[in-house]
Amino acid sequence: MKQRIGFIGVGLMGHGMAKNLVEKGWAVAVLGHRNRAPVDDLVKRGCTEAKDVAALVTASDLVFICVTGSPEVEDLVYRSGGILETSRAGQIVLDTSTAQPHSTAKIVASFAAKQVRFVDAPLTRTPVEAEAGRLNSLVGADAATFAEIEPVLKGFCENVFHMGDVGAGHVVKLINNFFSIGTGALAAEALVACVKMGVEPKKLVDLISVGAINSGFFQNFAGGAVAGDYGRMKFALANAAKDVRYFSQAMTEAKVAGVMHGAVNQSLTQALALGFGAPDKMLASLVEAQAELNGVKIGAGT
């Protein structure tokens, strides 16, 4: 029999994940949300709605968490009537957020005392792939637990990677996001340099588009920016800043020598200070922020 699934966080990513699971035969309970549209849609597709966290956990074998970061995860776990308090031996809790490794380690120990397994399974790709069931999952778990949950993860993922023991998923996710966000910060400065030095930014995009460093990321980020479409890449700038901040903290705690994370963190911090942290501002607004700092404009026609 398929496990009963409880799903907390049916926003941009979670809606597609829960949709794919219920449509592929799992019994899925979802937690109510202030934004009723995704919840109501999932209920129409066959999900049930739990009245609170305790009711959801009690009715589930696997509990998915899909929220922004460690503060939200810890609140769901440790609050009165939360996941930890209402969990039971044998359950598995899967955190698909982008979280801090030291927070993950603390939560793992708390659940282990109740014989509940906690798995970190953060995701890559976007809400588009979430709806299509084509996400990537980076799993931190022991081999036996990974084998148990892999079929469920494949319900909404194209690729499921076993990164190592518990905690490895969140570590690799932070490194992956630092790499991609850092690429965005580099591209933003390069595009603005074009304008300041009298070259049309699209010429640089055209050149890179036929070279070895071209990528889907570059096309969404830089290609969108020079066309004036800063929302082509669906990754909020504020969330990117959070991820780089988490990575910088993890680097410091692990005593890893390096300077690039500090520069990327500063680029994002400047963008937030300039007002580009609103929910509708995506990562490519780094280009807008760099343009504002340099007194130029970038967009369609530049």
Image (spheres, rainbow, N blue to C red):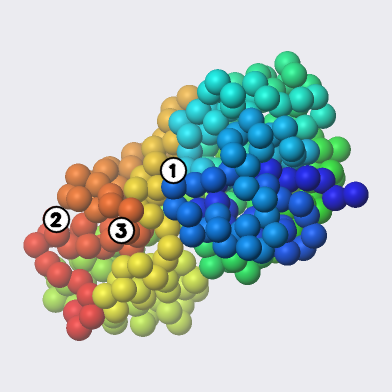
- Provide the secondary structure element on which disc 1 rests: helix
Residue 16's mark?
A: none
Earlier residue among tags 3 and 1: 1
What is the three-letter code of the residue carrying label 2? Leu
Residue 18 drawn above or below residue 129:
above
Residue 293's mark?
A: 2
User: Which residue is pictured at 42% across the width and 58% down the height?
Assistant: 235
User: Of residues 80 and 270, which is closer to you in this image?
Assistant: 80
User: Which residue is pictured at 46% across the width and 77% down the height?
Assistant: 211
User: Residue 69, how many percent across, how many down?
Assistant: 48, 38
User: Of residues 115 and 194, which is closer to you in this image?
Assistant: 115
Earlier residue among tags 1 and 2: 1
* Residue 151 seen in the current view: yes
- Provide the secondary structure element on which disc 2 rests: helix
Which of the 4 image quarters holds residue 207? bottom left
User: Of residues 30 and 157, which is closer to you in this image?
Assistant: 30
Residue lying furthest right? 1
**Which label lies toward us, 2 or 3?**
3
In the visual, does 189 lie left or right of 250? left
Residue 243's mark?
A: 1
Residue lying furthest top? 113
Residue 281's mark?
A: 3
- Provide the secondary structure element on which disc 3 rests: loop
Residue 204 drawn above or below residue 54:
below
The Cα atoms of the two marked residues, 2 and 3, are separated by 17 Å
User: Residue 240, how many percent across, how many down?
Assistant: 40, 49
**Which label lies toward us, 3 or 1?**
3
The Cα atoms of the two marked residues, 3 and 1, are separated by 16 Å
Contact? badges 2 and 3 (CB < 8 Å)? no
The Cα atoms of the two marked residues, 1 and 2, are separated by 23 Å
